[in-house]
Image (cartoon, rainbow, N blue to C red):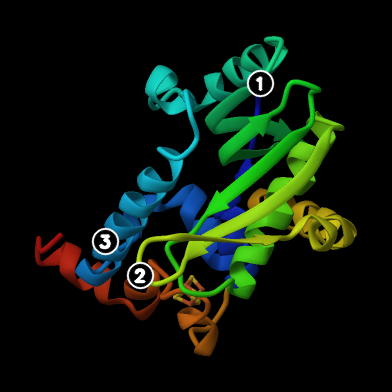
Amino acid sequence: MLYRLTKSKFILGLQCEKALYLDVYKPQMAYFPPETLMRFRKGRDFEAMVKSLFPNAIDVSQHCGRNIQKYPEMTAQLLEQPGEVNICEAGFVYNEVLVLADVLHKDADGNVSIYEIKNSLSVKDVFRRDVSIQHYVINHCLKSIVSFSIIYNDGNDNPLYEELLPEARGAEPLIAKHVERFKEVLQGTEPQIETGEHCLSPYECPYSRYCSGKITKQLELGGL
Ligand code: SF4
């Protein structure tokens, strides 16, 4: 299945179209400071703990590894099985956008609930956009979504839930516009965007060294 955008690239594009462009065409220029890598690791640990709460979950990533193209195919096969099923990293593609859902639960009647896991003490706006882009894609692949929740951290590694399905449904027209815009961006040349406050929100941009010229200097010095 062909795709040009992913969930993370979509979120990056909302922050800065140049960051999206760089992430597709110059990903080697990304730099993640140690604090960010630590945050990723803690996030993965919390995510693994929450996933373990779903009995007999089948993790698509353990079967398909880095072969991302295979995720939607295996997910579709698992969803064809009768009865209840829990799937981790369930893959879907629509309109050239690929998303992987942290956990998908299909009940015996075929109703689907999806869970996005974040190691955070609150539900931030960026998480709402994260759920909205996933819903945009998955809702075009399955017509049986009855719930789309964020699972976040109460501060003691206990999961809290917030239902975001109505909000995600309402955001669909806006998400569709962004998707078309980002596909245009990827067909053009590197956007000329100055650095500014947007480089730090909602996350510190991994291309800040590139945009400030520091990475070129380090490459010349053989430092990277
Ligand atoms: S550093 Fe700032 S201007 Fe450069 S790509 Fe990132 S967000 Fe955009």
Residue denoted by label 3 = 37
Report the side of 191 relative to 195 (left or right): right
Q: Is residue 120 left or right of residue 110?
A: left
Across and down, in percent, residue 183 comes to 72, 49
Per the image, the residue denoted by label 2 is: 210
Q: Is residue 73 above or below residue 205?
A: above
Q: For the C terminus, which image quadrant?
A: bottom left
Q: Which residue is mark 1?
A: 84
Residue 188: in sight, yes or no?
Answer: no
* Distance from Cα at disc 2 to Cα at disc 1: 48 Å
Q: For the residues marked 3 and 2, what is the alpha-carbon distance in whole angstroms? A: 18 Å
Name the secondary structure under disc 2.
helix
Q: Is the CB–ligand 1 distance for label 3 below 8 Å? A: no
Foreground label between 1 and 3: 1
Percent coordinates x, y for residue 53 in the rendering: 45, 40
Q: Image point 67% across, 10% down: which residue?
A: 81
The residue under the point 43% across, 19% down is 64
Can residue 222 be seen at all in this image of the molecule?
yes
